[in-house]
Amino acid sequence: MVSNKKVLFQKIPTAYPVIGEHIAVEHSEFNLDAPLLSGEFILKTLVLSVDPYMRGRMRDVSIESYAPAFVVGQPIDGYAVAIVEKSNSSVYKVGDYLYGMGDFVNYAKMSEAEAKARGMEVRPDIPTSGLPITNYVGVLGMPGATAYFGLEQVGKPKAGETIYISAASGAVGQLVGQLAKTQGLRVVGSAGSDEKVAHLKNTGFDAAFNYKTEDTDAKLTEYCPDGVDIYFDNVGGVMLETTINHMNNYGRIVACGAISQYNTSFEESYGVRNLVQMVGKRLRFEGYIILDHPDFDGPFRERMAKILLDGKFKYLEDVVDGIENAPEALLDVLHGKNFGKKVVHVADA
Amino acid sequence: MVSNKKVLFQKIPTAYPVIGEHIAVEHSEFNLDAPLLSGEFILKTLVLSVDPYMRGRMRDVSIESYAPAFVVGQPIDGYAVAIVEKSNSSVYKVGDYLYGMGDFVNYAKMSEAEAKARGMEVRPDIPTSGLPITNYVGVLGMPGATAYFGLEQVGKPKAGETIYISAASGAVGQLVGQLAKTQGLRVVGSAGSDEKVAHLKNTGFDAAFNYKTEDTDAKLTEYCPDGVDIYFDNVGGVMLETTINHMNNYGRIVACGAISQYNTSFEESYGVRNLVQMVGKRLRFEGYIILDHPDFDGPFRERMAKILLDGKFKYLEDVVDGIENAPEALLDVLHGKNFGKKVVHVADA
């Protein structure tokens, strides 16, 4: 028997989730030697991704959305890299690295059908690429594809334009900024600490500011003297309203996230008062979810791995050790306390 | 000498403009027999269009926007049909019908250069088509092109989808609804009086309601049981917020106008609180201005004239007589008191 920690969803939160009340770690045991039916195998979790969108999954199961609701009493799940520890399957063999939606547990027994339903794919590139495994749930995973797709397909950047990115040091933002830089844009970002701002400048942002200590409106005036052509919006709320005032005609607002609004009720949500500018400035404000574009994934990963191996990009990860620290890691992301892409390192292969 | 009434812009309003304070009628005289320099001609105004966008022109000239600011002390201008009364020009001949941006005056002396700057074009189709001249500043003019372009190019409708149109009996809305009907959409509209609602049903809307006496949220639930795929937004504000709650995944919000927000300060503007749904529902919210698409105009007019001559469309006009009533007509449009496209009939040819 081995120790098997699980992160359980316990109760639907109405504001920020609280550890112990809404999510909690359960200690249990797992029998690695239990017999496996044909097609079954045992997965050992290596890394887990914690991301803002997970807040949206903490809802009543009756409410439909792009990502399924977490089930009360069950482990939460998310993007994961795991290794096959034991196997009675000809598809998933011992030593195979898998990427897909994994439960927040140390060990899990799985059937081939369940693995398929979770989008688990065998990924021989993970142990051979020379890139850290944590990259595969971040810059090479969902957040990376979200950044690349959002900038390219929704933002439609043109050299010489100005892009402004909020939550710019996060999993998506830091990559958007560096990609935009390679395409000849003026890149401006904001983040919630001076340390994050310094990191942004260090990755090549033309300008960056701490939105908690500086006035966003004044800083946008100063740093975007020609206005904003693309606003890559990760936060929504008052930041969105302020930025709309700086948008140029034909500007694009890439609706990637709205983290400032994820933990408030509708009544308490910030009301954006200047949408009248959508018409006069001919703005396009467009939301997208990377899950809708699975065909994008393969080509994206190939291009991104090449970029990373070139060594020119600086993708900052904020790695915590131990699955028992996953709830706090998730809370950190929701509160903006992460410094770079937050990843939970659960175990080595 | 003939009487020449002019509608002057007198002062920049901060809320709804007031007749006598912000716009006023001036009585003057015009000498039809004054000598004309080479290239000069005299225009007699026949019909004038009053439209919501004109409120946006009542601003400080230093503020740039898609349509130039009105100049204090000068006549306001707008879409007009006029006839050449006298001429010393080989381009604009006596009896020619002109369409373009005309001053709100009975008579005006004009040079060829000024006529060109105002986009004045000789339009032989106007007196020969068999369609009312008022149509040329409405269903065949800017509002018509706005409706057609917005539905087709921005909304991208698909048969079987549901479209909801606010200010649906207005110059743009009533046409959007009828066009959408021909493309196999379920068409739902709202307007501000029972009389307008009855008219919408009479033009083939599947359902319509009076937003002043009915609850929009309840009515959208009832009339759009499969949700809203396209929201053709003419009003903005709380109507926009309520409709976002009913939007389907991949829905489009055509930002055509925001009349509920034109006469309020930024501070008093309605704050839309549910933009977080832009991401989860992958909505596209897009503004446009028909002036950006001059190439659309010719082909549009040809198609639209054919549709109108077929006699199947019901395009309601709210015609007032006399240029002295133009200020009130404009106020009516801003207050939603018009019943159909508001047009000022100034004179017969």
Image (tube, coloured by chain):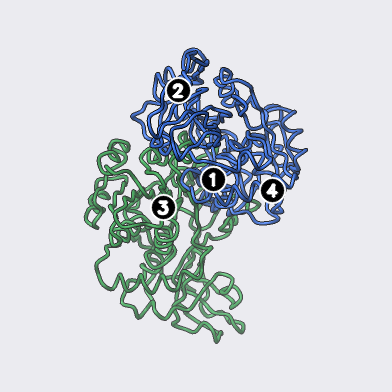
Chain colours: A blue, B green
Q: Which mark is residue B125?
A: none
Q: Position of residue B273 (x, y in %)?
A: 47, 33
Q: Pick whichever, A308 or A145, lies toward us.
A: A308
For label 3, the SS is helix
Q: Pick whichever, A18 or B51, lies toward us.
A: A18
Q: CA distance from mark 1 to mark 3?
A: 15 Å
For label 2, the SS is loop
For label 4, the SS is helix
Asked whether the viewer can see residue A244, the reply is no
For label 1, the SS is loop
Q: Label 4 amino acid?
A: Ile
Q: Label 3 amino acid?
A: Glu
- The answer as to whether the residues below labels 4 and 3 share one chain is no
Q: Which residue is mark 4?
A: A307
Q: Which residue is mark 1?
A: B13
Q: Which residue is mark 2?
A: A75
Q: CA distance from mark 1 to mark 4?
A: 55 Å
Chain letter of disc 3 in the image = B
Give the mark toward the camera: 4 or 3.
4
Label 2 close to label 4 by CB (< 8 Å): no
Left or right: residue B317 versus residue A347 is left
Chain letter of disc 4 in the image = A
Q: Position of residue A9 (x, y in %)?
A: 44, 20
